[in-house]
Image: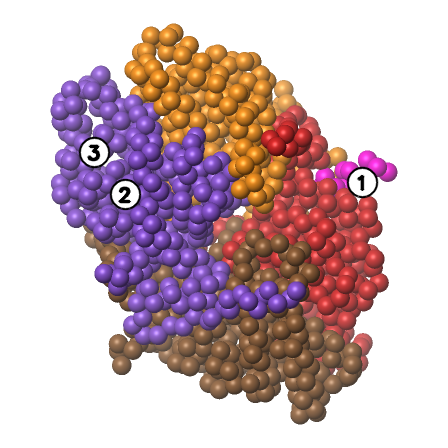
Chain colours: A orange, B purple, C brown, D red
């Protein structure tokens, strides 16, 4: 009766050595296999399995990942065809477009005096800073011109949010730091369900006040598109960075029929005990028929900018080795 | 030099006694004034101050607050005119409308087997359960009829999300447990920026497939409305339950001009260190010009369903005493 | 097959009304029964059940609960015989003894400048302040005298930590705000496994330097005492505030034989995913044979000073009603 | 006035590439410099600085780090003289000694049924399993023999906890996976303030029952030792894994005189808002005079087994490069 345990895999202490690669360390963490180091290793294994199984991969982005400098990690995955769709908050693409127009983020600290920053017209995102002047010249002003150009081009036809985003992607400068441009060039679909909950929306409202009736974007139109992807693809999986609407938007697309998400990797510090979706484990979505009971369900309790580059670096190391 | 501290208020240990009221305990917590018990007390003080100063009050809802049974607490505040606008995720109103049509939530546990629930057509939200059959008969089916009726009534005019929600509110049964109906009757505006990120959206997409061109909802239209509120009201404050898009949607409306939110009460377990908006302290929004540097900024680190009823009960006890 | 759910209890939305008592609100939370409001209600039910079943009750204290003003809540429970043993960090009793000698804590804020406080000889505990001068005159100096008096009285016999603490309790002034004195008067045993990890220890080391060989305290002696309690009492349960060594010290006493802890209430914000004991759910201790698989296991995810007074107030309201 | 921000360092997006080393990725994270990836990079920089400045380094261990397989990472640092003292919970050394006697940990899952494990005599630590039979034969039994041997050797002289631990270290088998043995061989002092709050203590109490008066361990004796280190070393710094008593034990040793800890790296998921020491930022300890206001204070919000191997691997990569 007690023999079960002895058939189990032993925890093998992880080792470190000079010049070890990221993947070598993550393999060591997998040997130990415990706590969050074990989970990190399982996350890389699961991402590798998604690729091997030809799963369509949704990457959902929530939190200020672009200001924190995660854009090129995501672009690397986009360029290597390791992501098929991105679902993101509006803010991340606001920042992305600002970068495309030459804007910058600056290093600060979470304990700066916000009342002084207010006077200096500096906006703070945790320990990242952005200049309101740059925001205006590198985002607000170009965007209003884009809106003008786009609405003329589409003759004020009602667009879906992703169609609008595609029109924007087409027109922004070709900067290697822009996720949006990289997606456009690699034909990776970008969903931004909360475009209006960002400066894209604030500027759209301003544009609409000046030129009423020109910019028409329907709130429901994208749902059919994401269903079409689900219908077409044999297998789909999701990598969820941080929760929020982008997470739910991917998950809910797999409600209502028999095709479920296969594997899910979720990286968040949000807790399950609030009952909110962000911290809910993917198991919960099994009851809703959104995720395959038999797929991998990885919940990595970690801040995203620390965990995700490790996963990306380890994955591309593994894939290069195979080629 | 050392005398500063002796001029400070002393921590007075809190006392408990039989039959003490909620407010009496919270006053005791304020006497101690420390850690989260002190913060809870400051939250009630700040809510009271918002009322006294005639602040327009936004209440933002995120997380499955209706399934968890917080609806009547919110309705109590709506009925007493202690809330002026609600900004919520779609899901909370999906659940609210289901309740209006006689649907129910059931008590479960977070450790139930989701694969069994899947087979039994039971959906789980942390420790709350809902029957998919009830979901269909008490929400999906009535909603499709509502969409039909509404689109006929408005002659397929393009609506804002809040206009659509108002049309729905008008038509649902008059149940005392429905936040949406209570708001409708009390003329409290309801913003649902992520309506499409909920079953409202999924059903809308189905409706649109059956009857193309009838249901037209613009994603940007609500922004002008919320700006109009800001312009009209002398003072505005916000109570943020749980973060997410509803939080940002309120905050961003105060970007771009000189009128800032006065006081903010935020209740969440999300952490600031992720850089995401949900866990960001209101101080951060000061740098963006969204919140008055001199207003109260309450960050209560707590699960919402536990903290908010305490605040509501204490507040109405105080207000009744004054009358 | 689907009928199971309809036999389940429904979530009944909680209600709030003016002048409702703490217990009335917690009963309402129990009607909703979900998320952490439901858990708070189950915590009170479980405490009530411990009392009804005549369980011996260990209360473990970790975190700066005395500086935050929780002392009188604990004393109320001690005086009402609702607690049988206290297991605490050294720091809480350092602060308690300081209070007995007339010391005070002062209200501060977590964002004060610690380098300035350093110069002003003010020590900070989150948002509570203490004067180093008061610390010296109201704790350090009296304690050295106590050590002198005690070691003379016991003739340098080797004591257990709890014997030393009892000797201290006997000698400190009879202040109604002192947990230690209240326990002494009510014959409630006080275990302080980490006495040396506090200023009790630092002063003991200073005393030992001055008067070598006089103060002898054995590190292992208390274990037999706590085992004797376990052996004598038919049923034992535990209320764990905050985790740490006090939690483990209670739990480990139930390792090694067939008598297990019956019910456990645990209040903490620590997470289980670190693998540390503080955040570990009581279920884990079932595998170790420390907790009865069939007992209640309450994990309330909350800061302690906010949650525990609610539980105490509701409990004594219920118990008074019965009498 | 607005030019400040433009003098600041820009966030440079981090890049990933195949076969990049751990340190290369952490340097990239430092280029971005934001959120927890930036903090991880600062942690490595600070560890490097401690070494460069010849700081005496305390490493504090809390949480089940040995069962999770972190032992060899710690041993690597001990062997390379990158750690000078270890302060740990008793449990970590219980597990370490069990490993020295050939015991093993096995991979499990946090959702296993603890009542079944109880029957199978398997103990669970989050997702790690240990056999009670192995525990008995590879720890309990050898330890009782060690206690016998040691008490004979020291002729029942009263020991400090670290003296007892040194005697144990001397006698256990020379396994390369044992931290305790590695420390013994490298002359690294090991403090275990909570030895009694572990199976070392339970077995000591059993031993004392059988052979009264032989095993005498004083609870206060170690304090003088750690003060002697402080007095002798010009600079001291601390790396805190997980908080708890080990953290406080290091910190409190720097209370009471003018020598403060220089740099502190703290890795924990515990929150500051509880007012407990584990989650308290090192800044708080500045007010107490324990930490130099001008030293580096790193708070990495992360689970330890995921973060610390990264830091160790990056550090030794950097140090090897210099040689």
Estimate the spatial distance between the alpha carbons at disc 3 and disc 1, rounded to whole Å. Answer: 66 Å
Q: Which residue is mark 2?
A: B84
Marks 1 and 3: in contact by CB < 8 Å? no
Write down the chain letter for disc 2: B
Q: Which residue is mark 1?
A: D319
Q: Is residue D123 visible?
A: no
Neighbor class of circle 2 (other Cα within 10 Å; few <14, some 14-19, many 20+) is many
Judge by depth and name the residue closer to the eye, C100 or A21. Answer: C100
The residue at the point 41 percent across, 39 percent down is B260
**Image position, residue B174 (x, y; %):** 13, 43
Q: What's drawn in magenta, residue-wise?
A: D313-323
Q: Quadrant of residue B120?
A: top left
The residue drawn where x is 36% and y is 23% is A205
Q: Which chain is disc 3 placed on?
A: B
Quadrant the C terminus of chain A occupies? top right
Q: CA distance from mark 3 to mark 2?
A: 15 Å
Q: Which mark is residue B166?
A: 3
Residue A320, given in percent of the width and then of the height, sits at: 64, 23
**Magenta residues, dominant SS class:** helix
Both on one chain, marks 3 and 2? yes
Residue at mark 3 shares a chain with residue at mark 1: no
Foreground tag (3 vs 2): 2
Q: Which residue is more in the foreground, A271 or B40?
A: B40
Identify the disc placed on residue D219: none
Q: Are marks 2 and 1 in contact (CB under 8 Å)?
A: no
Which is closer to the viewer, label 3 or label 1? 3
């Amino acid at each position: 009766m007690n023999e079960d345990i002895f058939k189990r895999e032993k925890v093998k202490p992880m080792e470190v050595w000079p010049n070890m690669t990221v993947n070598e360390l993550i393999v060591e963490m997998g040997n130990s296999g415990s706590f969050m180091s074990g989970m990190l290793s399982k996350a890389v294994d699961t991402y590798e399995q998604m690729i091997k199984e030809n799963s369509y991969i949704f990457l959902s982005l929530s939190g200020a990942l672009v200001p924190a400098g995660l854009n090129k990690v995501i672009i690397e995955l986009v360029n290597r065809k390791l992501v098929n769709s991105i679902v993101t908050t509006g803010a991340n693409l606001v920042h992305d477009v600002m970068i495309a127009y030459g804007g910058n983020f600056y290093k600060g600290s979470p304990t700066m005096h916000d009342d002084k920053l207010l006077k200096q017209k500096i906006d703070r995102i945790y320990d990242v800073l952005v200049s309101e002047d740059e925001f205006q010249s590198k985002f607000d002003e170009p965007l209003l011109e884009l809106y003008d150009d786009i609405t003329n081009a589409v003759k004020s036809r009602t667009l879906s949010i992703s169609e609008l985003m595609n029109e924007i992607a087409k027109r922004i400068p070709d900067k290697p730091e822009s996720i949006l441009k990289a997606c456009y060039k690699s034909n990776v679909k970008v969903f931004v369900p909360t475009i209006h909950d960002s400066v894209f929306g604030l500027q759209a409202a301003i544009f609409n006040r000046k030129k009423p009736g020109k910019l028409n974007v329907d709130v429901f139109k994208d749902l059919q598109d994401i269903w079409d992807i689900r219908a077409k693809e044999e297998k789909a999986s999701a990598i969820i960075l941080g929760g929020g609407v982008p997470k739910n938007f991917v998950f809910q697309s797999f409600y209502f029929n028999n095709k479920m998400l296969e594997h899910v990797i979720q990286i968040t510090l949000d807790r399950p005990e609030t009952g909110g979706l962000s911290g809910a484990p993917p198991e919960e979505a099994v009851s809703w028929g959104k995720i395959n009971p038999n797929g991998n369900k990885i919940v990595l309790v970690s801040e995203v900018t620390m965990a995700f580059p490790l996963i990306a670096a380890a994955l591309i190391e593994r894939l290069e080795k195979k080629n």
